[in-house]
Every structure is written in structure tokens, then in C-alpha cells.
Amino acid sequence: MAVAFYNLNAESGLKKLDEYLLTRSYITGYQASKDDITVYSALSKAPSTEYVNVCRWYHHIDALLRLSGVSGEGQGVKVEGSVSITVESIATPPVADTKASAAEDDDDDVDLFGEETEEEKKAAEERAAAMKASGKKKESGKSSVLLDVKPWDDETDMKKLEEAVRSVQMEGLVWGASKLVPVGYGIKKMQIMLTIVDDLHSTRYRALGFPSVGNS
């Protein structure tokens, strides 16, 4: 016996459909089919969330149509009193334009790895010569160092200690920010950032020659 629905865009029709889908995932059978598409196309818009079962089913069919289409044949459902749409027109997603794809494939036939022409070789040689003539010296790398400076005891004047540390000046050395960090028993150590040019100095900062205001 064929399944039939009436006036699905009215409250009475939606209520009947909602009751029908209470125990079913699809209109007929155990997979999406053209019967689902027939009912889906008869609805003029997405159903209200008031009709829980219809709403669930509708969005499921809508997702299938967007992703892969519906291929099941169904059992021949009937819908009366609603605008119908040809099932075949929406059951399968549209096929991409093969002519456009073929035109794009023609562009891919360009040989990007063909033999280099004499003009291309000459241009490459000229670019290489220009780069060599520019003679730009490679910029030396720089290193950032976080230096710990510890006082002899809690009576050491940390301000003077910092002044003594910063008094060390040499090419390629730049002092940065500093802060005091507690180490215990009321004693604080000083942490200070410095940047050095690698080609001019070693990162072994003990060789920088600090004055003997505190030990580090």
C-alpha cells in the first residue's frame, strides 16, 4: 500500500507527518530514497522546530542532497495538496562542467622543465654577475644573553652593582633591561639582558671583564 500525505504546508499536514516520522528515519525503507525527495520537495520551507521529527528528518535529507545526493528508488509515495518538484532534478547533485575542466587541463600541458634557451642562460649569468658585483657583506649574527649577577651579601648596593656592570662598554655589546630576583635570606640577584655580535664576542660572558663589585 502506497504511503500518502496531504497538504504538508498546513498545520494539520505537518502534524500527521511528524507523527509518521516518530518511529521512522525515512519516509519508506531503511535508506534515503526518492520518496524522501518527493516529500522534501513538497515542503515550501524548512519546518518549524515545533515539529521535532519532521525537522530532524528534513535537515538530514537536506544534508544528503548537498553532500552526495539520494539514489534509493523508494516505494512510490503520494503527496497531495502541495506544490511538487521533479524528483530527478534534485535527487543527484549537478555534475561539474567538463568543458571548463578540459580547458584548464590544456594549461597544465606547458613544459616547465624543458631545456633552457640561450637567452635564458644569458639572463641567468647576468643576474649572477650582478649579485657578485654588489659584494654585500653577510650580516653578522647576534646573540641575546640573560646574565645573572649575584652580590657578596645582603649589604651590597645593587644600584651601584648595576652601574658597575653597565660600565663595561665594547664594540658589539648592548645592554638591555634588568631586574632584581630574590634568592633567599634577604639577598637578591640581578638579572640583566645583553646582546652581542657573534663575530666580535664569544657568548661566554665571563670573559667580558666585569669590575669586582660582586661575584657572578
Image (cartoon, rainbow, N blue to C red):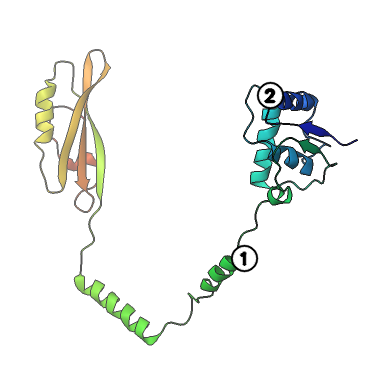
Q: Nearer the viewer, residue 146 or 135?
A: 135
| Residue 53 picture quarter | top right
Which residue corresponds to mark 1?
98
Q: Which residue is mark 2?
A: 11
Q: From the viewer's perspective, is 26 left or right of 137? A: right
Q: Nearer the viewer, residue 189 or 83?
A: 83
Quarter holding residue 131: bottom left
Give the farthest residue toward the right.
1
Q: Is residue 36 above or below residue 9?
A: below
Residue 125 position in % (x across, y down): 31, 80
Instruction: Judge the density around disc 2: few (<14), some (14-19), many (≥20) Cα neighbours within 10 Å.
Output: few
Mark 1 or mark 2, which has the lower sequence index? 2
Residue 211 seen anywhere in this rendered image of the structure: no
Quadrant location of the N terminus in the rendered image: top right
Amino acid of disc 2: Glu
Q: Residue furthest top?
A: 185
- The picture places residue 3, in percent across and down from the top left corner, at 84, 34
* 10 or 72: nearer the viewer: 10
Across and down, in percent, residue 25 comes to: 77, 32
Observer-nearest of 150 and 48: 48
Tag 2's secondary structure?
A: helix
Measured as percent of width and height from the top left, residue 57 is found at 71, 32
Other residues around mark 1 within 10 Å, as few (<14) / some (14–19) / many (≥20): few
Q: Secondary structure at mark 1?
A: helix
- Taking the spot 18% from the left edge, 23% from the top edge, the residue there is 151
